[in-house]
Amino acid sequence: MFNSHEFYKKRLSAHLKELGRYTRYILNGHMVVVMFFLISATAFYYQQWLTELPENFPTALVIGVSLGLLVSYSPVRTLLQEPDLVFIIVAEDKMNAYFRNSLIYSFVVQLYLILLLVAAFSPLYFAAFPERTGTGYLLTLAIVLLFKVGNLIANWWMLKVREARVRQIDLLARTFLNIVIFYFIIQGNLFFAGIITILFVLLFLYDFSVSKKQAGIAWDLLVEKDQNRMQSFYRFANMFADVPHLKNRTKRRQWLVSLISSRIPFAKKQTYDYLYRITFIRSGDYVGMYLRLIIIGGLFIYLIPNIWMKVLFGLLFIYLSSFQMMPLYQHFRTNIWLDLYPVDHILKKAAILKIIHQLSFVQVIIYALLFIVLQEYLGFIVFIVAGGLFSISFINGYIKSKLV
């Protein structure tokens, strides 16, 4: 007889083994050192900033928006796979234990984000409201956990609805209510927080009524959502190790492709230059990752007061960006058509080094210009020199040795 609880235990065990397989590559020596440096430096300057916290700083708004977004983002990890659409769908009426376990697992794996964010905001909270006690903040944490559970259940109910627009409107409404509720809680206005909570409960009950009207579980939607999340993990893990399960996604971005590739000569020796440029633009999350790292690095340079730490953080994010572009070299490892190219293999290695050099120098220029905006002209000169030398040495040294 089919036991969905035992089936879930086997599925979860396989899932955790798969995550652990790639996590050990992600948490290698390089990444651990970088993360330790980032966390240590951020904590140091965060503490310094709190000592000079402006009286009119919108603490309630910042914490309220952050907590509201956090509890609203409550995806349900069902661990369903494509074969389940054929072999397990017939046992839908026996899957209650399976989906109950999925909700519990989803809550547990998202719990660390709540604890991290609440811990990170605690110094800001007590600096802005020194008259309040730790008991009040612990009560806020309990309310966050309660709303997290409520949003997780509401998301599960809405996954039975196939109309994407309905799900989006519901999520938008709940997100707004969550933000307003936590804004009033942090501000200390419990009366208005209670009124908005009543509206949230009404929306929660409406979601329940909508889910009850659905014919059954939208299995294909659940599989699609879970597979998309796993592919996101695989794309991230692919930056550190070879991931055979990765499905490459492509986006047209025709205007950007035309802009970038128009200057490449139509010549045999430029084959891989053209290929890697359009791959960087259209495939996976290369462009997104590159832009996000530039923005985050720019924020560190803008916010950190010490000029030498600005330079150090700039170099750190140049290292991260260059390191994250290395998977481009193996992007077509399963495509046999590239083996038929009548092009010397040496040009392939030269092309990937060239594009990483170009991306790195663009990042150096952007950060150097940021120093000018901040009117730190010594930092501009130092960073131009240090960034250029670091990019050349790191790419021609470390990255070149890893491209085999």
Image (cartoon, grey):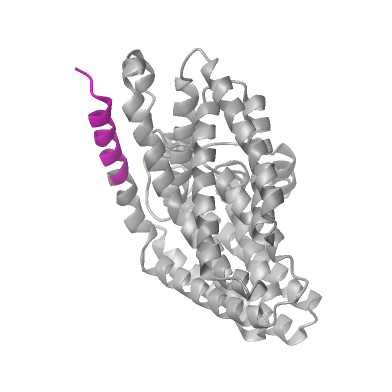
In which quadrant is the N terminus drawn?
top left
Q: Residue 343 in the image: x percent, y percent?
A: 49, 45
Where is 343 relative to 224, above or below? below
Residue in front for this viewpoint, 307 or 184: 184
Residue in front for this viewpoint, 13 or 322: 13
Q: Classify residue 206 by image quadrant.
A: top right
In which quadrant is the C terminus drawn?
bottom left
What residue occupies the far left of the structure in this picture? Answer: 1
**Residue 95 lies in magenta, yes or no?**
no
**Residue 9 lies in magenta, yes or no?**
yes
Q: Which residues are magenta?
A: 1-16
Q: Classify residue 296 by image quadrant.
A: bottom right
Name the residue: 77% across, 84% down.
377
Q: Residue 134 in the image: x percent, y percent?
A: 52, 69
Q: Residue 133 in the image: x percent, y percent?
A: 55, 71
Where is 337 relative to 177, above or below? above
Residue in front for this viewpoint, 54 or 186: 186
Q: Main secondary structure of the magenta part?
A: helix
How many callouts does the rendering have?
0
Name the residue: 41% across, 56% down.
240
Q: Is residue 362 visible?
A: yes
| 52 displayed left or right of 122 | right
Name the residue: 54% across, 33% down.
154
Q: Is residue 388 visible?
A: no
Q: Classify residue 211 by image quadrant.
A: top right
Name the residue: 39% across, 47% down.
108
Q: Residue 144 in the image: x percent, y percent?
A: 53, 51
